[in-house]
Image: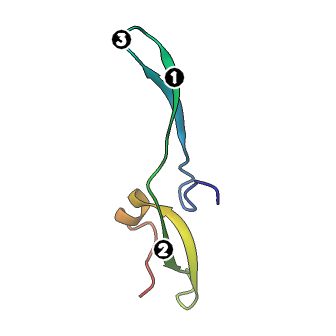
Amino acid sequence: MARICDICGKGPLRGYNVSHAHNRTKKIALPNLQTIRVLQPDGKSVKRATVCTRCIRSNKISKAP
């Protein structure tokens, strides 16, 4: 499973941990993804989707009952 939101496309962020001595080690910040049941736009069918919590909170999707 790809670590990408199905709604907004948010994915992993890559960067460095930088110490006081400026030693750099690679790090990855993963998005908070949840697998939820999403109601389709037709209002009748339900589909599972991997969605970030920001999309859930901002009502970009409608959760299935």
> Which residue does the image show at 58% across and 62% down from the upper left?
6
Tell me the crowding category of disc 2: few under 14, some 14 to 19, or many 20 or more residues within 10 angstroms, Cα based: some
Distance from Cα at disc 2 to Cα at disc 1 = 34 Å
Q: Position of residue 16 (x, y in %)?
A: 49, 24
Q: Disc 2 or 3, which lies upstream in sequence? A: 3
The kind of residue tagged 3 is His
| SS at badge 3 | loop
Classify residue 56 as left or right of residue 40.
Answer: left
Q: Amino acid type of disc 1? A: Thr
The label shown at residue 36 is 2
Disc ID at residue 1: none
The residue that appears at 57% across and 53% down in the rendered structure is 9
Tell me if label 3 and label 1 are in contact, CB under 8 Å: no
Mark 2 or 1: in front is 1
| Percent x, y of residue 43 | 52, 88
Q: Which residue is mark 3?
A: 20
The C terminus lies in quadrant: bottom left
**What is the tally of numbered marks visible in this picture?**
3
Give the side of residue 9 with respect to residue 54, left or right.
right
- Residue farthest to the top, as pictured: 21
| Amino acid type for the residue under numbered disc 2 | Ile
Looking at this view, is 51 or 62 the one in front? 51
Residue that numbered label 1 is attached to = 25
Mark 1 closeness class: few <14, some 14–19, many ≥20 residues within 10 Å: few
Please rate how many residues cluster around mark 3, counting C-alpha atoms within 10 Å: few if below 14, some from 14 to 19, many from 20.
few
Q: Is residue 4 left or right of residue 16?
A: right
